[in-house]
Image (cartoon, rainbow, N blue to C red):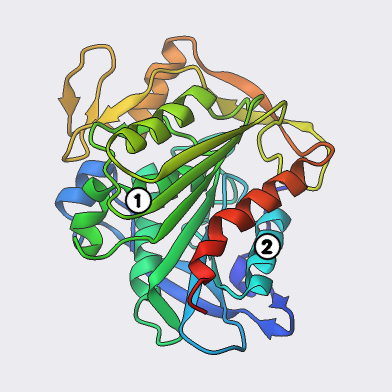
Amino acid sequence: MSERTTRYRDDQVTYRGVEGENLTIESANPANYVEAITDPAGGEPVEIDAKLFVPDSPEPHPTVIVVPGSLGVGPNHEAHAETLFELGFAVCVIDPFGPRAVSSTVADQTAYSFAASAFDVLATLRALRQRPEIDADRIAAQGHSRGGSAVTIAACRRFADPIVGTDVGLAAVYAVYPWCGHQFLDPEIGSTRYRSIIGERDEWCSVQQAQAQAHAMAVGGADATIRVVANAHHSFDRLEAVHEIEDAMVAPEAPTIMLADDGAMIDPRTGEPDAALTDYDGFVTALKGGHGRTGASIGGAGDEPQVFRDDMVRFHSPLLGNV
């Protein structure tokens, strides 16, 4: 899978004869979670791209926001978006990369912060809720890899409340092979239904961190589940053979960085929160600790893409109940 060389907004994408409407979403570039939480209106502004696909059927529509991973919007994300569209969902595919002049974060995840990625999701939620053809109470988010981290953090009320308000939230979150290296001490997600799915042989993201995240949410009373797909690699939903991305920089065995209520990263070596710490600091520490390595595999094998598709459809389908 190669990096995207064009802006997603410039592609003409049609699902079942319906052409995607280009949207501009007003988001931000917070330096870290503290900035996003304590000053959500004061961060560096950025407008991200999105395409909205709305079925030609009675309104308002349940909607799924699709958030790509480190390679940007790819064929697998568009295939899943089309599947959901055919089921009756409105679908909004976002492109956080193009407007930031980023082609890929495979080799450097610090091109912009993980807090900004999660902010993008909530900014999209806020924008979609203003659309009359969208059911504001039935908006879900599906994120892949880095996007899986984004939708997971966006579900957490400690992050969401200051940005969209205490009475606004995602109806459901489907975190696809998510990176869960940042986790709130209080991962309360309110009424959001949460599920993650990850391959047993994932070399990019820690299966144990994903399990711990879902378990912590469930212990707090949330409807949170996880599925580990036997023998599957990262991006096992892709219709392409398993292969190595040579320049991928990964550190799945690095310690989890917990987040205080104000978003401050807690240094795992000292147990002390520091509001000044950023993603870059965490990744440098991981590398110095010997946890980083170059090269990691992606791709699907056998029936894995179909296993994913079936799980995705089962998870999102309850939102169609009132259509």
Say above or below: 313 vs 304: below
Q: Quadrant of residue 24?
A: bottom left
| Residue for badge 2 | 78
Q: CA distance from mark 1 to mark 2?
A: 23 Å
Say above or below: 179 vs 89: above
Q: SS at mark 2?
A: helix
* Disc sitting over residue 284 in the figure: none
Label 2 neighbourhood size at 10 Å, few (<14), some (14-19), many (20+)? some
Q: Is residue 67 visible?
A: no
- From the viewer's perspective, is the residue at label 1 or at label 2 nearer? 1
Question: Residue 208's spot in the image, x, y percent?
Answer: 49, 23
Q: SS at mark 1?
A: helix
**Residue at the spot x=35%, y=51% of the render?**
154
Q: Is residue 84 visible?
A: yes
Question: Residue 38's spot in the image, x, y percent?
Answer: 15, 50
| Residue for badge 1 | 155
Choose between 141 and 279: the one closer to the eye.
Answer: 141
